[in-house]
């Protein structure tokens, strides 16, 4: 399918042009990339401008609703033990980090989805930023979007991201003694001892189901 055909089927919405222009003007050199993609505007900003991006989105673009905050680990998934590159039963993995819309430079990226409930305003923006590959750290959005609190705590649990100045940086899903971050690509799922489920009980057969009934 040609690019001309794609543009005829899915033209860039007018509100995307408006959002791109306003966000670009407000962020200036702190904006690394911005484009319309699949119904959203996707913007990648410098990590140090993460809070600035949220403030612009909320106060100048009326994007007052935070849908979610999450993290992507772009590291290629390790080859499972006992398999080889020629094992066709294992899906082929890229050998290098392959980034999504807007590009990237590090292993981890944080991204947030923002919307507005006000008619006549640009309606949807995804903001993303690169995080340090060894010690992912970013400022909290919780002062601007109170709903960011739990989303950020989930990212702490699952990816090991530290949110500077977060008001309540406690685990939200995992036990306090749990070690590691389960959604990282290098988390050793098979390295833990398999234990019986504590709720497992013997179940008696239904009448007529046993051999002696």
Image: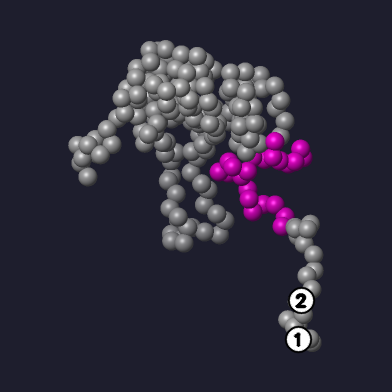
**Which image quarter: residue 156?**
top right
Name the N-terminal-most of marks 1 and 2. Answer: 2
Helix, strand or loop at disc 2?
loop
Q: How many marks?
A: 2
Is residue 198 positioned above or below 164 on the image?
below
Which residue ends up furthest to the bottom in the rendered image?
212
- Residue 114, position in %: x, y? 49, 27
In this figure, which residue is indicated by the disc labeled 2?
A: 205
Residue 191 included in the magenta stretch of the image: yes
Q: Residue at x 25, y 39 (%)?
A: 9
Q: Main secondary structure of the magenta part?
A: loop
Whether residue 48 appears in this view of the structure is no
Residue 95 relative to residue 180: left or right: left
Q: Quadrant of the C terminus?
A: bottom right
- Residue 199, position in %: x, y? 78, 58
Whether residue 151 appears in this view of the structure is yes
Q: Residue at x 19, y 37 (%)?
A: 4
- Residue 190, position in %: x, y? 64, 54
In this figure, which residue is indicated by the disc labeled 1?
A: 211
- Label 2 CA crowd tier, 10 Å (few <14, some 14–19, many 20+): few
- Label 1 CA crowd tier, 10 Å (few <14, some 14–19, many 20+): few
- Residue 103, position in %: x, y? 40, 31
**Which image quarter: residue 182?**
top right
Magenta residues, start to end:
172-194
Q: CA distance from mark 1 to mark 2?
A: 10 Å
Q: Residue at x 63, y 50 (%)?
A: 189
Residue 51 included in the magenta stretch of the image: no
């Amino acid at each position: 399918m040609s690019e001309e055909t794609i543009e005829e089927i899915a033209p860039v919405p007018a509100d995307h042009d408006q959002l791109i222009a306003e966000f670009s003007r407000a962020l200036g050199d702190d904006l690394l990339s911005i484009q319309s993609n699949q119904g959203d505007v996707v913007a990648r900003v410098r990590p140090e401008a993460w809070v600035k991006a949220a403030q612009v989105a909320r106060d100048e673009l009326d994007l007052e609703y935070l849908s979610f905050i999450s993290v992507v680990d772009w590291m290629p998934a390790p080859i499972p033990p006992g398999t080889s590159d020629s094992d066709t039963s294992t899906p082929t993995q890229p050998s290098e980090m392959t980034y999504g819309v807007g590009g990237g430079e590090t292993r981890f990226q944080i991204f947030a989805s923002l919307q507005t409930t006000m008619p006549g305003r640009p309606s949807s923006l995804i903001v993303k930023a690169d995080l340090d590959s060894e010690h992912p750290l970013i400022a909290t959005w919780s002062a601007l979007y109170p709903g960011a609190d739990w989303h950020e705590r989930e990212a702490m649990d699952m990816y090991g991201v530290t949110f500077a100045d977060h008001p309540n940086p406690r685990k939200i899903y995992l036990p306090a003694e749990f070690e590691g971050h389960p959604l990282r690509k290098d988390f050793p799922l098979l390295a833990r001892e398999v234990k019986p489920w504590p709720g497992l009980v013997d179940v008696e057969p239904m009448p007529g189901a046993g051999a002696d009934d």
